[in-house]
Amino acid sequence: MSPLQPLNKSARLAILCYVGISAIVFLLMMIVGLVMRASQAQLIGVPPQFFYQLMTAHGGSMIVTSGLAASAVLWYFLRRYTNLYTPILWINLGLFLTGVVLILGSIFIGGFAGAWTFLFPLPSHGLGIWSTGAATAFIVGLLLIGVGFLIFYLEVARAILKEYGSIPKALGWPQLFKNSSDTMPPATIVAGTMVFIVNILGILAGAVVLVLILINLYVPRFEVDPLLTKNLTYFFGHVFINATIYQAVIAVYELLPQYTGRTWKVNKVFLAAWTASSLMVMAVYPHHLMMDFAMPSWMAISAQIFSYANGIPLIIVTAWGALTIVHRSGIKWDAASLLLMIAIFGWSAGVIPAIIDATVAVNKVMHNTLWVPGHFHFYLLTGLVAMLLGFMIYMINGDDQSAPINPNKPIDVKPMTAADTSAIWVYTLGSIGFSMMFLISGTASVPRRWAEHFPEWIVYSQVATVFGSFIVLAMLILVIKIVIRLPKARTL
Amino acid sequence: MIHENVLLLSLVLMAGVLFAFVYVFIHSTKLEQDYASIAKNSYSKRDKLFGFIIIAGVLIAIGTTRGLPYGPHNANAKQIDVIGKQWYWEISDTTATVNQPIIFNVGSADVNHGLGIYDKDLRLLTQVQAMPDYTNKLAYTFKEAGEYKLMCMEYCGLVHHSMISTFTVNDEG
């Protein structure tokens, strides 16, 4: 690999904006999440209308902000292998911020509380609580954010294809299927290719459903099929959040070799897993629709089989690879590497209850209970967010003094302070405990998205509130550190 | 009950993952220079595990697709229409008898809802989505007499959490 080139000033500034904004929004939305759980625990009083507004803000903001932070990871590492056009970063950020302003305005000024999943025709059924204008602002806001991301991934596609020639080559198919002796594509290229394929399709599906809902808002005669929109919504949502994880995991592929001084070898199993997941991540979304009996039953059956087959290869490849590269490596842990390792655990463990829930017989009694936020909070809080925090802390650690521009030499480790260590472990235990309380609540059949709970269920929320407080406290420490040190972040 | 079994299975598998990470983490700071051997040994095990899990996963997935709730349904079952409306259930009949096969014909007059049937211990027994323009047929046979709750399982607006009706199941005869 050629020595690293410094980031150009504009790209560096943009990436630091992505990092800073994401870190702050994560913290704020975690506080919102804590308020919701404290309200369900009856420790504070939040009126149902405001609860559902907070729920809409929390879900929507977390999804798009995770996408923003993960796109920074992808860009930062991808530019080591390709020539990316920096203004795209700013266009994406501009559209993102404009969209966020519209969404927050629709929620907190217009009273929109239709949930981030905006299941048709709920946006047009505010029953006087929110107006058509508020629903429009929410949908247009999401559309703008989607357009920004679409432009971003088109640029990723352009840059990769220019360098590697074709999608099959970027996915390593000649090496996988034809025993080509050409050098394997780097993990970042393989992951980046998979991400741009699925995310471009996913975002387009999301844009279609948003436009359909938008037209229907003003021309109710324009009939929209609720089951079709549900399919499009879940296709978009499932693909987008999974692709977010697949981008963030690039930080693990790139940084653990630097921390251990070992090579993360791309081999045929790696290539096969990513190719298989590229296809299957798009095929499994009907597992969100297993309780829609009007759907063809073969879709539920195939979703169950694909869900089992989809999650496993990529995670085994990544988790096993991470464990192998770290095992007896003499690694000197710092905050960034520790968070990345915790994140791989969170992702690997968190998908287990998700995969089990993709069994029709289980889904029948777990769907739309708190089991669902249980598994996605596990792999998003302990997994994705920890991964993104690891990347952020790597960025703010500044340039590597001992091995300034050689990615194959062990990194210059920044010793952890007591505050770092405490914050990371409190965050980890808090996020595991918080998610486990969702899972336990789901086992007790507590429905999700209920502003008020029966007295029998309140104890779960109360314990969850304690764990949630740990998360917020730890996150506060980490975010302050990240934001303060942003100006001294890496230039390479 | 399936609920507890699902939690137990999840916890066992998650504990296995945790064990692997803790084991490697504890041994991570010791240095073994011969990474090639470590990698070869590790990836050999992974490939075996990989194949085993894929085959087991697909077999389990196929094996658990028996007895799906999608029909065909008992033609002699009692038919009960359930329509979700913001924010109440319109139910054609709120009574049934123990061991009487029932088909709930579930739809919606406005937005997406979800019909969840809860027993007296607030345990979710079964559910189905309630959608405008579609009728989802949910087959269920109550095994115990008593009062059941029909609750909304899909977020449908500001009174979603209060969209609850009761359903009475009487003893046979």
Image (cartoon, grey):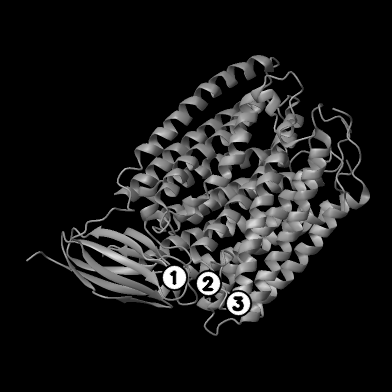
Task: Identify the disc placed on residue A121.
Answer: 2
| Place of residue B170 in the rendered image (x, y in percent of width and height, measured from the top left) | 15, 68
Q: Which residue is mark 1?
A: B132
Q: Residues within 10 Å of mark 2 (few under 14, many from 20)?
A: many
Q: Residues within 10 Å of mark 3 (few under 14, many from 20)?
A: some
Circle 1: residue type: Pro
Q: Is residue A207 left or right of residue A163?
A: left
Q: Which residue is mark 3?
A: A217
Q: Are marks 1 and 2 in contact (CB under 8 Å)?
A: yes
Can residue A79 be spotted in the picture?
yes
Mark 1 and mark 2: Cα distance apart in space: 9 Å
Residue at (68, 19) in percent of width and height: A179
Chain of the residue that carries numbered disc 2 in the rendered image = A
Chain of the residue that carries numbered disc 3 in the rendered image = A
In this view, the residue in front, A482 or A105, is A105
In this view, the residue in front, B75 or A465, is B75
Residue at (40, 61) in percent of width and height: A446
Circle 3: residue type: Leu
Mark 2 and mark 3: Cα distance apart in space: 9 Å
Chain of the residue that carries numbered disc 1 in the rendered image = B
In this view, the residue in front, A394 or B171, is B171
Dot 1 falls on a residue whose secondary structure is loop
